[in-house]
Image: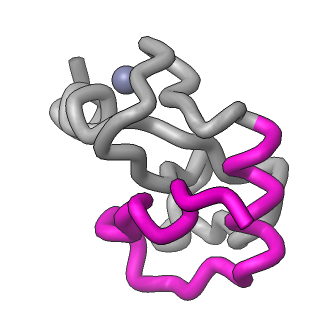
Amino acid sequence: MPRADNAIANQTTKAVIPKVVRMTVIQRDLQRCVHCASASSLEFDYLVPPTKGGAAVLGNLQLLCASCMRLKHQGR
Ligand SMILES: [Zn+2]
């Protein structure tokens, strides 16, 4: 079990991401932010947000660090 699973916050969504999906996303993205490759303060990000019908599935999720998450949601 990667320790990162416990360290990753899940603040961006109120929907529950199944554990197996979270584990797979973490492994696929190598426990790093897909934007800047930071390995700290990682969060799950939806490509299509649940509010727009996005599902908690592998193809709709990526890892972002808190900084990139903030930038993304500021519209950058
Ligand atoms: Zn980042």
Q: Vertical placement of 2 versus 31: above or below?
A: below
Q: Judge left or right: residue 24 versus residue 12.
A: right
Magenta stretch contains residue 26: yes
Most extreme residue toward the top is 36
Residue 69: x, y in percent?
Answer: 31, 38
Residue 14: x, y in percent?
Answer: 40, 83
Q: Quadrant of the N terminus?
A: bottom right
Quadrant in the rendering for residue 22:
bottom right
Residue at image x 64%, y 70%?
53
Residue 59: x, y in percent?
Answer: 82, 49
Q: Judge left or right: residue 56 versus residue 48.
A: right
Residue at image x 66%, y 51%?
61
Q: Quadrant of the C terminus?
A: top left
Taking depth in this image into account, of 4 and 13 the one nearest to the observer is 4
Q: Which region of the structure is painted magenta?
A: 1-28
Q: Judge left or right: residue 48 versus residue 24.
A: left
Q: Vertical placement of 67 versus 16: above or below?
A: above
Residue at image x 70%, y 32%?
30
Residue at image x 53%, y 55%?
4
Magenta stretch contains residue 76: no
Q: Judge left or right: residue 25 versus residue 59.
A: left
* Colour basis: one colour
Quadrant in the rendering for residue 19:
bottom right
Q: Vertical placement of 42 versus 10: above or below?
A: above
Taking depth in this image into account, of 41 and 60 the one nearest to the observer is 41
Figure label count:
0
Residue 27: x, y in percent?
Answer: 78, 45
